[in-house]
Image: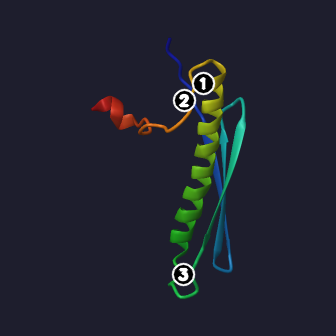
């Protein structure tokens, strides 16, 4: 079976008084997951807005990724293919199939 899907991510960033906030929304077409991230500039550091943007955005996307992984785990468990109980092994990664 061949499938082609397009999922969209929308990312909003705002900065005020050295605090950058990010909201990431993943739209799969059938559901939306929303993640949040925050970055604060240490008052002793040089204020470089792009660093705050990158940190807040990555944290928001990490939040969405965690929600997506938990949803997949629940769905796998529902069909008897979920992770085993107890200590988990090394996480599966894309490079594991290429090597």
Q: Nearer the viewer, residue 79 or 40?
A: 79
- Above or below, 24 relative to 88: below
- The CA distance from mark 2 to mark 3 is 43 Å
Locate residue 93, reporting x and y percent: 41, 37
Q: Which residue is mark 1?
A: 76
Q: Is residue 17 left or right of residue 66?
A: right
Q: Are marks 1 and 2 in contact (CB under 8 Å)?
A: yes
**Element on which disc 3 rests:** loop
Q: Is residue 64 above or below residue 46?
A: above
Give percent across and percent down for residue 41.
Answer: 58, 78
Where, quadrant-wise, is the C terminus in this rendering? top left
Disc 3 crowd rating (10 Å Cα; few below 14, some 14-19, many 20+) is: few
- Which residue lies under the disc numbered 2? 83
Between marks 2 and 3 in the image, the one whose residue lies nearer the viewer: 2
On the image, the x and y values in percent for residue 82 come to 57, 26
Q: Can you tell which of label 1 and label 2 is closer to the viewer?
A: 2
Front-most of 53 and 67?
67
Q: Which residue is mark 3?
A: 47
Which residue appears at 48% of the width and 37% of the height? Answer: 88
């Amino acid at each position: 079976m061949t499938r082609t899907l397009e999922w969209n991510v929308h990312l909003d960033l705002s900065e005020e008084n050295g605090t950058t906030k990010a909201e990431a929304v993943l739209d799969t077409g059938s559901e939306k997951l929303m993640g949040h991230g925050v970055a604060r500039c240490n008052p002793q550091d040089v204020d470089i807005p792009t660093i705050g943007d990158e940190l807040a955005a990555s944290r928001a996307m990490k939040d969405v990724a965690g929600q997506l992984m938990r949803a997949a785990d629940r769905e796998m468990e529902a069909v008897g293919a979920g992770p085993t109980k107890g200590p988990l092994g090394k996480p599966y990664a894309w490079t594991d199939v290429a090597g």
